Amino acid sequence: MGDLKHGRTVHSLARLLAQYRVVLRYVAPPTLEMPNDVVEYVKRCGVPQVRYYGWSYVCMYMYACIVKYSIVNIFHISAV
């Protein structure tokens, strides 16, 4: 989630994950979407990709991540 266009790390990670049985989900503002060369490489490897481009998706995923993080912390604290 975030700047998928300029991040070399996320480009390398997508190429690495393309070697495994995963589904890649890209969440970014419209101007920062994953470059076509990376998308095409992952596609050639046969890995499914889902693109979420738009501010509403960015906000939705940020909220979902915060909620999941909070739930994990609650269970971690109660387990101690």
Image: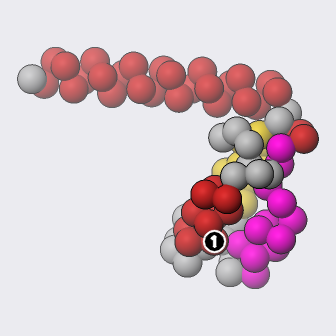
Q: Is residue 11 above or below residue 64?
A: below
Q: Amino acid at mark 1?
A: Arg
Q: Is residue 80 visible?
A: yes
| Majority secondary structure of magenta residues | helix
View extreme (right): residue: 31
Query: In terms of depth relative to the viewer, which is nearer, 75 or 34?
Result: 34
Q: Is residue 38 magenta?
A: yes
Which of the image's four quarters has the C terminus?
top left
Q: Is residue 13 magenta?
A: no
Which of the image's four quarters has the N terminus?
top right
Q: How many other residues sit within 10 Å of disc 1, few (<14), some (14-19) or many (≥20)?
A: some
Residue drawn 45% across the image and 27% down it: 68
Image spot of residue 15 (x, y percent): 63, 71
Residue range in magenta is 32-44
Q: Which residue is labeled 1 in the image?
A: 15
Query: In terms of depth relative to the viewer, which is nearer, 12 or 72?
Result: 12
Image spot of residue 76 (x, y percent): 21, 26
Q: How is the image coloured?
A: secondary structure
Q: Quadrant of residue 49?
A: bottom right
Q: Is residue 24 visible?
A: no
